[in-house]
């Protein structure tokens, strides 16, 4: 019996050695891996907005900026355009979300009514879905005197009094104007009754009318145009 | 039957079973092939290293998909038959943009397998691994670098 046990033990050893030898033979070129097969997947960063150009046009502020990409070939889908009031009095910012047109340049118009009585500059923040980039630098300032009361003073003039009507929103027509000209004369780009404009809130036309308070409210102040978003 | 004889018989049966198992189950018995795994985790005996390389993908954004191409390098002196390629997102460069399916998803390899690589050769796989950033991914992920780990399983073959 002991012989049988010894014999079987020897067989087991031989098999184990054979198996091990086979493994070692195949393992001649084996290398235990010492590095990971890893690759990088980079996510695009949201760019900062580009400083816009602004110009007065028919008494409105036309804001223009170049379209931006989140990745090569993929344009932003929206922009947040904010008008910031500057000067002594404090007015809340006016923010607009503009849907991108897909063109090389984007633009939006702020009506003279909502800007009247203040000096403003604008910033742009690009958006892609819920992602939003940092605000651009501020544009130059544009001044909008108190509503063009001189226009509304004349009875029957309401059809042409609004400085916000009929303006062009085409980016091609928007040119960055020099600040002094734009700020000093609201009529510099207008064609309507320039002779009435220079003295800003001159009371003369108001006095000629029966009810004095109404002309100061003006049609443009009461009924601003709908937002000129794109 | 005496006790010692029973022991001897049972030992013989166990050894026979072991031999049969090695013959049938062993990867060596299957057309002279070995299972080789490129992953570094585990360090199990029998692992063989072969290189998986790829081009990093860039400019992911919500709703976009990039396709990661993979190249296999076979350092062995025998042909390598790549049977399986998988990938997973393993890390993120930003803590506030964790590696979760809502932020980044890695799909299944799209090309045909197996692919044979010649000894000491290199082959770019015909397919790719899609890397997708879902809509609604966190804004914290803007500018993040994810790490994608690729795993491959192949066989060393003479054919």
Image (cartoon, coloured by chain):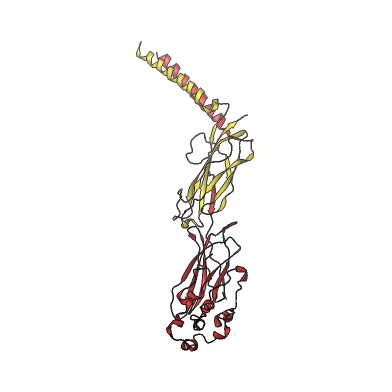
Chain colours: A red, B yellow
Q: Residue at x 57, y 76 (%)?
A: A58
Above or below B80: residue A138: below
The spot of residue A98 in percent (x, y) is: 52, 64
Q: Nearer the viewer, residue A38 or B132?
A: B132
Q: Nearer the viewer, residue B124 or B40?
A: B124
The spot of residue A161 in percent (x, y) is: 52, 78
Above or below B90: residue A222: below
* Residue A93 makes an appearance in the image: yes
Q: Residue furthest top?
A: B1
The image quadrant that residue B70 belongs to is top right
> In what quadrant of the picture does the C terminus of chain A appear?
bottom right
Q: Nearer the viewer, residue A120 or A214?
A: A214
Q: Nearer the viewer, residue B112 or A59?
A: A59
Above or below A64: residue A76: above
> In what quadrant of the picture does the N terminus of chain A appear?
top left
The spot of residue B27 in percent (x, y) is: 53, 28
Above or below B13: residue A147: below
* Residue A17 makes an appearance in the image: no
Q: How many marks?
A: 0
Q: Is residue B123 left or right of residue B35?
A: right
The spot of residue A39 in percent (x, y) is: 55, 48
């Amino acid at each position: 019996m002991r012989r049988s046990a010894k014999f079987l033990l020897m067989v087991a050893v031989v098999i184990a050695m054979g198996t091990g030898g086979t493994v070692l033979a195949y393992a001649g070129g084996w290398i235990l891996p010492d590095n990971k097969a890893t690759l990088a997947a980079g996510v695009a960063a949201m760019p900062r907005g580009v400083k816009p150009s602004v110009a007065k046009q028919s008494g409105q502020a036309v804001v223009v900026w170049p379209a931006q990409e989140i990745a090569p070939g993929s344009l932003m889908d929206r922009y947040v355009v904010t008008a910031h009031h500057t000067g002594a009095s404090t007015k809340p910012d006016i923010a607009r979300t503009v849907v991108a047109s897909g063109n090389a340049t984007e633009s939006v118009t702020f009506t003279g009514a909502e800007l009247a009585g203040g000096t403003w500059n604008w910033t742009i923040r690009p958006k892609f879905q819920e992602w939003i980039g940092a605000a651009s630098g501020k544009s130059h300032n544009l001044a909008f005197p108190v509503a063009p009361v001189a226009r509304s003073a004349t009875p029957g003039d309401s059809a042409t009094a609004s400085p916000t009507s009929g303006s062009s929103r085409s980016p091609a027509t928007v040119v960055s104007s020099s600040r002094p000209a734009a700020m000093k004369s609201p009529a510099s780009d207008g064609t309507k009754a320039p002779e009435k404009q220079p003295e800003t809130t001159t009371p003369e036309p108001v006095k000629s009318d029966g009810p004095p308070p109404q002309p100061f409210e003006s049609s443009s102040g009461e009924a601003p145009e709908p937002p000129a978003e794109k | 039957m005496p006790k010692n004889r029973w022991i001897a018989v049972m030992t013989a049966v166990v050894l026979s079973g072991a031999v049969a198992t090695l013959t049938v189950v062993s990867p060596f018995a299957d057309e002279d092939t070995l299972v080789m795994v490129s992953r570094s985790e585990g360090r199990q005996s029998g692992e063989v290293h072969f290189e998986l390389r790829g081009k990093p993908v860039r400019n992911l954004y919500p709703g976009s998909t990039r396709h990661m191409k993979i190249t296999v390098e076979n350092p062995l002196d025998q042909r390598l038959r790549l049977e399986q390629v998988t990938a997973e997102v393993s890390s993120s460069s930003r803590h506030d943009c964790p590696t979760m399916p809502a932020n980044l998803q890695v799909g299944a390899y799209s090309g045909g397998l197996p692919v044979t690589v010649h000894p000491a050769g290199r082959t770019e796989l015909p397919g790719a691994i899609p890397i997708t950033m879902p809509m609604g991914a966190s804004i914290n992920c803007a500018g993040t670098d994810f790490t994608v780990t690729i795993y491959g399983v192949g066989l060393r073959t003479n054919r």
